[in-house]
Image (cartoon, rainbow, N blue to C red):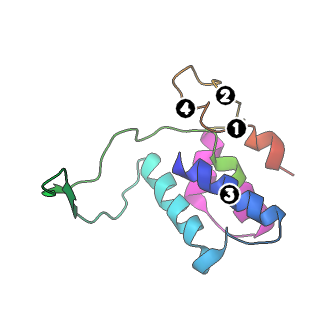
Amino acid sequence: MGMGQMDAFCEMAWSQGDDLYGYDDNRFMKAAQYVATYNLGGDVPFTTYTWGSGPSCARMSQTVISSDSRGQVRPVWDILHYHYVGRRKLSVPSITAIAEQGRPEGGGGDDGSDSGGFDQLGFGTLMYAK
């Protein structure tokens, strides 16, 4: 749902004249492409990372990319597709492909009570297709 929260922030800023979508050489677009590629079943780069946990800061490592929630299509992709393809005329093949899988985006609970549809407003197809 990070993509959905971030695209909401970017759209609010865009409406006020600030381009967070394009910040730092389209950093968010690149992140969204990565997440979309991963959720479409594509290979994405991954680097092992290590952190400290608990009162003793015990070292833990994530050595492989997680498959938890892989493949979920939530109502967050059309806003990104229509911004980068429609407004900016950029090619974002993974964002476009995952947006097409979720069309038309419905609202909360449209895909079941535990679908995550309540986490994001949805209706992106209706609101952003022009």
Mark 2 residue type: Gly
Residue 97 on the magenta span: yes
Label 3's element?
A: helix
Image location (x, y in percent) of residue 27: 55, 72
3 or 2: mark nearer the eye: 3
Calculate the distance from the C-alpha at mark 2 to the C-alpha at mark 4: 8 Å
Q: Which residue is mark 2?
A: 108
Q: Is residue 112 above or below residue 97?
A: above
Please give the label number shown on residue 116.
4
Viewer-closest of 6 and 123:
6
Image location (x, y in percent) of residue 100: 65, 44
First in sequence, mark 2 or 4: give its number: 2
First in sequence, mark 1 or 3: give its number: 3
Mark 4 residue type: Gly
First in sequence, mark 2 or 1: give its number: 2
Q: Which contiguous range is marked in magenta?
A: 81-101
CB within 8 Å, label 2 to label 1: yes
Q: Which residue is mark 3?
A: 9
1 or 3: mark nearer the eye: 3
